Image: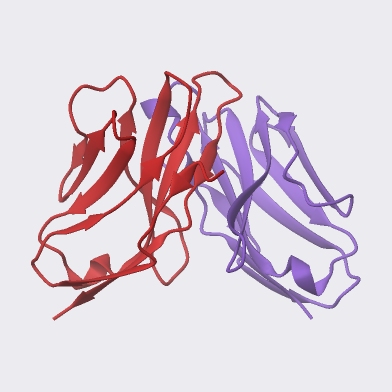
Chain colours: A purple, B red
Amino acid sequence: DAGVIQSPRHEVTEMGQEVTLRCKPISGHNSLFWYRQTMMRGLELLIYFNNNVPIDDSGMPEDRFSAKMPNASFSTLKIQPSEPRDSAVYFCASRRFLLSGNTIYFGEGSWLTVV
Amino acid sequence: AQKITQTQPGMFVQEKEAVTLDCTYDTSDQSYGLFWYKQPSSGEMIFLIYQGSYDEQNATEGRYSLNFQKARKSANLVISASQLGDSAMYFCAMREGAGTASKLTFGTGTRLQVTL
């Protein structure tokens, strides 16, 4: 089975530009997570969805960040406008609830640099 | 308060030796899960092993085992017969609760370096 697929793998953008990160979860998984990893703050949960419905977005840093999950096989994380402090690795992860202890499987990450 | 504590920012181990990476956790839930992930320099997060709070035996997956001491709230990862490819960051994580609202909280990680 294919794992969690994220795109783009790397993005460099100018401050003020809109950034859209995409994620395709593992087929059959019903929960999807967006994490951000930085040296300063480690791994932070931004938002997660169960059955395409946002459950907890308390980790979204501010209104510039938004996430959607229009269907079970696709999610986006959007930053508008982007700022240099948004530079980080953004991970998408998914799980199938009640399977294997609710183990979460990660994508390879999207490395974002805002200059 | 930190829910997951990894007190070793960095560890060294010689090839073929065993190494223990420490993890302590804090929760008042009765049902929870503990996970270890590996992050090599390439950046991906790789799931290694899982231990449920009600599991009576320590989890094992190949060269990985989880030393689960519930009373002490510790979930240390033991890697036996270290290999050069084990050099990576290792993250301990905890899932609290068992419902659909459960989510993972991560520790700050331990960087393991395997030497010849």
User: Is residue A103 toward the left or the right of residue B57 in the image?
Assistant: right
Vertical placement of residue B109 versus B10, above or below = above
Q: Residue at x 12, y 72 (%)?
A: B15
Is any atom of residue A6 visible in this view?
Answer: yes
- In the picture, the quarter occupied by the N terminus of chain A is top left
Please name whichever residue, B57 or A102, is drawn nearer the observer in this view of the structure: B57
- In the picture, the quarter occupied by the C terminus of chain A is bottom right
Is any atom of residue A3 visible in this view?
Answer: no
In the rendering, at what x and y percent does residue A10 appear?
A: 63, 71
Q: Residue at x 52, y 29 (%)?
A: A28
Please name whichever residue, A81 or B96, is drawn nearer the observer in this view of the structure: B96
In the rendering, at what x and y percent does residue A59 appear?
A: 72, 44
Quadrant of residue B34 in the image? top left
User: Is residue A20 toward the left or the right of residue A25 in the image?
Assistant: right
Vertical placement of residue B33 versus A45, above or below = above
Q: Residue at x 30, y 52 (%)?
A: B22
User: Is residue A67 toward the left or the right of residue B1 in the image?
Assistant: right
User: Is residue B5 toward the left or the right of residue A72 in the image?
Assistant: left
Please name whichever residue, B20 or A37, is drawn nearer the observer in this view of the structure: B20
Vertical placement of residue A22 versus A104, above or below = below
Quadrant of residue A16 in the image? bottom right
User: Total marks drawn?
Assistant: 0
In the rendering, at what x and y percent does residue A32 appear?
A: 61, 37
